[in-house]
Image (cartoon, grey):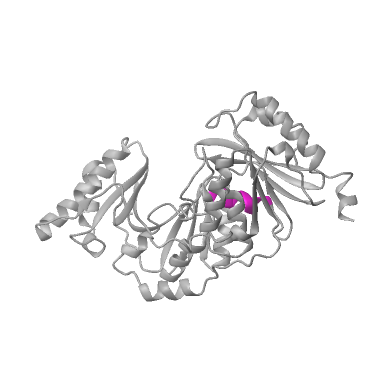
Amino acid sequence: MVNEKFSSQNTFSAKTIFGFEEILADELKLLNAANIKTGNRVVTFQGDNKLLYKANIELRTALRILKPILSFEAANEKQLYKNIYDHEWENLLTLTSTFAIDNTVNSKFFKHGKYASLLCKDAIVDRFRKKFNRRPSIDPKNPDLRFQLHISDKICTMFIDSSGESLYKRGYRIEKGIAPLNEVMAAGMVMLSGWNLNEPLYDFFCGSGTILIEAALIAGKIPPNIFRNNFGFMKWKDFDNKLYDSIVSEYNTKLSSGETHLFGSDIAEENIKIAKNNAARAKVNKVIDFKTADFQNVKPEYKRGCAILNPPYDLRIKQDKIEDFYSRIGDHLKKNFTGFKVWILSGNKDAIKKIGLRTSKKLTLFNGPIESKFHLYELYEGSKKQINN
């Protein structure tokens, strides 16, 4: 494959968290994306710029969306440099643009990803110097355009990042607690849980409130990134501002207060303050009831519902006597949450066993670099058949 170039009707790559590929594919189906295919932490799809804009705004489980611009084979540095140099980068970059190149390299031919991306940077800069006697600048922290170099064996693909900052940065969470879940992780957990939007949802380790805020956005059909005003595609030469504005104008950003069915609590008063501020920025503060409380004092007012919990693992957040702590969680659930479906995410495989409840389902997810298990406990009194009747 030599110097393959891509048309405007593109195959895009939406990056995601391991375990979220299928729900991301379902989200793309709702956007009427074409030719959707799942891979490892990625879902590819086809569409035009309108779909690309909508995907960045609406997708809850995508981390970033990449557009391929060039693909070729290279087995050495000279071939890599030449193929990058020959591409018409002036169609993407201006002399005043800043850019950066990230890399993902898995190849026996290129063992140092950082060096490969540096070589690509040199090729782009050299092309500009040759053509214009001037060159665009590098800005690794906040570039106008961010590219990603992927090398798998001999196959080299250069992507342009349409998202800019990762899509988990919704814009509402300015304040954070200790070791918070990112927003994509929280949204994916809610979507995997099968939570019925009309039933109560509890999180009594709510931290900065991310799980419940994402649940409120889902229930209100509010696009998660509607509050962002900066995407990578806005710096592209073909950015259609009128099209983007017309898309944004159609979205609902208001959520009626109604009767709240979302309940968050945390033992740390500072976390609750942060959670309330974050919910206010996301415009969902009227539908979430946050309070300071030890988890053992949280008792639901409903006979049925759902709870999604992310208790400390004793890794990033230290917890004394972690196995005893998890045992107390299990006792509390058995005593007070009968009739509920309870999901618990934990990266501590020994502690989670101390919950002492039968696991109905167990999924593997990655909370950042930590391999974690997402356990479902169905706390029915009697059989499922009796409950359903």
Q: Residue at x 72, y 34 (%)?
A: 329
Image height of 254 relative to 330, above or below? below
User: Which of the image's four quarters has the C terminus?
Assistant: bottom right
User: Magenta segment: does it hold 151?
Assistant: no
Q: Which of 302 and 66 lies nearest the eye of the viewer?
A: 302
Q: Which of 6 and 372 lies nearest the eye of the viewer?
A: 372
- The percent position of residue 311, horizontal first and vertical second, equals 63, 37
Q: Which of 55 and 107 lies nearest the eye of the viewer?
A: 55
- The percent position of residue 383, horizontal first and vertical second, equals 88, 46
Image height of 91 relative to 341, above or below? below
Residue at the farthest top position: 321
- The percent position of residue 16, horizontal first and vertical second, equals 50, 50
Q: Main secondary structure of the magenta part?
A: helix
User: Magenta segment: does it hold 186?
Assistant: yes
Image height of 8 relative to 344, above or below? below
**How many numbered marks have been drawn onto this rendered protein structure?**
0
Q: Which of 359 and 87 lies nearest the eye of the viewer?
A: 359
Q: Residue at x 71, y 56 (%)?
A: 261
Q: Residue at x 76, y 36 (%)?
A: 332
User: Which of the image's four quarters has the N terminus?
Assistant: bottom left
262 left or right, relative to 135: right
254 left or right, relative to 89: right
**Residues shaded magenta:** 184-193
